[in-house]
Image (cartoon, rainbow, N blue to C red):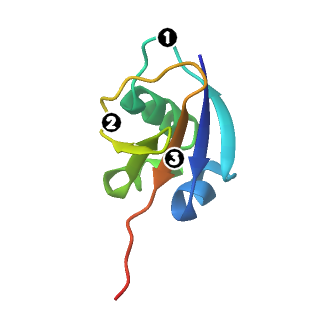
Amino acid sequence: MRIRVVAFATAARALGASERDWDVAPGATVADLVRSLAAVHPELARDLPRLAFAVDGELGRDDRPLAEGSEVALLPPVSGG
């Protein structure tokens, strides 16, 4: 399945792009996608504990299943005051 990955801030730097298409196996979850990304881009692994994930515009957990054409956003923590 082809998934669209959209990354922001440190996640985009780790991936070397703010958007990327990625292939995953049918039935893959967000966690499977992220493991696959981190295997190719190890610098992403250090940011994973702090990232939130949105699938097709909805915040979700990493056990959420993906579908062909899903868009997954890798969201860094928000700070400010």
Q: Is residue 76 left or right of residue 17?
A: left
Toward the top, the furthest residue is 26
Q: Which residue is mark 2?
A: 62
Q: Are marks 2 and 1 in contact (CB under 8 Å)?
A: no
Q: CA distance from mark 2 to mark 1?
A: 16 Å
SS state under label 1: loop
Q: Quadrant of the N terminus?
A: top right
Residue 71 found in image quarter: top right
Badge 2: how crowded within 10 Å, few (<14), some, or many (20+)? some
First in residue order: circle 2 vs circle 1: 1
Residue 70 found in image quarter: top right
Amino acid carrying label 2: it is: Asp
Amino acid carrying label 1: it is: Pro
Q: Which residue is mark 1?
A: 26
Toward the front, the furthest residue is 57
Viewer-nearest residue: 22 or 35: 22
Where does residue 11 sit, x and y in percent of width and height? 53, 55
SS state under label 3: strand
Where does residue 24 sit, x and y in percent of width and height? 54, 20
Q: Which residue is mark 3?
A: 73
User: Would you place residue 47 above or below residue 4 in this image?
Assistant: below
| Res 53 label | none
Viewer-nearest residue: 69 or 2: 69
SS state under label 2: loop
Q: Quadrant of the C terminus?
A: bottom left
Q: CA distance from mark 2 to mark 3?
A: 12 Å
First in residue order: circle 1 vs circle 3: 1
Task: Name the residue rendered at 62%, 59% in the picture.
Answer: 13
Task: Name the residue rendered at 38%, 23% in the picture.
Answer: 65
Where does residue 67 sit, x and y in percent of width and height? 50, 20
Task: Name the residue rendered at 39%, 71% in the picture.
Answer: 78
User: Would you place residue 67 above or below residue 18 in this image?
Assistant: above
